[in-house]
Image (cartoon, helix red, strand yellow):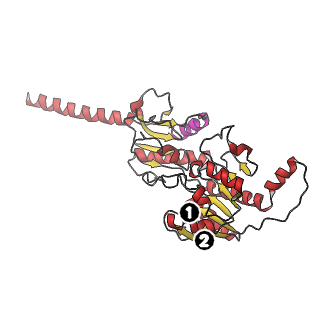
Amino acid sequence: MALVMSCWWRGRFFFRIFAKVAVQSEIMSILLVIPDRKLTHLVAELQQQLPQVPIVVWPDVPDPDAISFAVVWRQPAGSLTPFNNLRALQSFGAGVDNILVDPLLPKLPLARIVDPDLTASMIQYLDTALGFYRYRFDEYINAQQTQRWHPRSRRQLKAVTVLGLGELGAAVAMHLSQQGWQVSGWSNSAKHIDGVNCYAGLAELPLALAETDVLICLLPLTSTTNNLLNSETLAFCRQGVIFINVARGAIVDDDALLAALQSGQVSAACLDVFRQEPLPAEHPYWQQPNVLVTPHISAVTNAQTAVTQIVENYKRCMASLPMFNLIDQQRGY
């Protein structure tokens, strides 16, 4: 009898262990929460590299408890709360601010995509924009509308300030310095970059703004940088400064920038990012003659690079290893 009971308890014990392992092995699905995008190609690429892993597209989730890993981008607030077995979050892009705005975001590790092609793309965009203004293409486009022939010499643009000296901003600042620009940079914390006059902290922001012919914004969007460029801070710039924003739209007070454009404090602006995207048809930026609008194309993540990093981080998550390119959610980047 004792032998029978012993075998029964052992069998029950091993059954519980087996059942637990079986449940854990089922919690493997990847969830894509990327609204308003066609995801057929992304699903196919992920499935090719992870043939045994179910890829689920929100909101069609047949088994919420089977979700362990979520790839997100501009997810609706609260959309991740039903997934009790979620272990980690992966941004589909380099930024995370559109993810962190969710007040119900689970407190889980969050990684971003780091794409070396983004840096090259951003540098090419900014080189093009700087050449556009140096050769007065903005003025010639307006002159063409009235068939006005009025040749002028190049703008004497020499000094540029880069706001934001993270990985991307530092690379841009170093590149522009190598191209012969007088480069200043500003960031929240102190940085040292060869060839760049670096400032840090809100107290030194006026000094960085006062030195520049062209102001380039590459800041992350955080509680500190939201509306950082407003009527007060824009007034620190030289009269006629040119402004280029390739970071986030909410860093700029739109009304303040429009007023500065109309007064001449800011002579021209190249805007690639906006508070609301696509930019609404009724927005004044469309009709402002000294504003160039581009549809958030300064640096677009390479899809294959994103897939490779998603797959790697998924595997690391399942192996209980820290993911690559984790962000500090308290700092927002």
Instruction: Answer left or right for 9 relative to 308.
Output: left
Q: Are marks 1 and 2 in contact (CB under 8 Å)?
A: yes
Counting residues from the N terminus, which is met first, the one under dot 1 or under dot 2? Answer: 1
The question of residue 40 being in magenta is answered with yes
Which residue lies at the image location 67% right of the left edge and 48% below the top edge?
297
Which residue lies at the image location 51% right of the left edge and 39% below the top edge?
50
Report whether residue 298 is seen.
no
Residue that label 1 marks: 165
Hey, what amino acid is under mark 1? Leu
Residue that label 2 marks: 196
Stretch of the chain drawn in magenta: 39-50
Hey, what amino acid is under mark 2? Val
Place of residue 177 in the rendered image (x, y in percent of width and height, measured from the top left): 66, 70
Label 1 Cα neighbours within 10 Å, binned few <14 / some 14-19 / many ≥20:
many
Quarter holding residue 207: bottom right
Q: Which of the pair 157/327 is nearer the observer?
A: 157
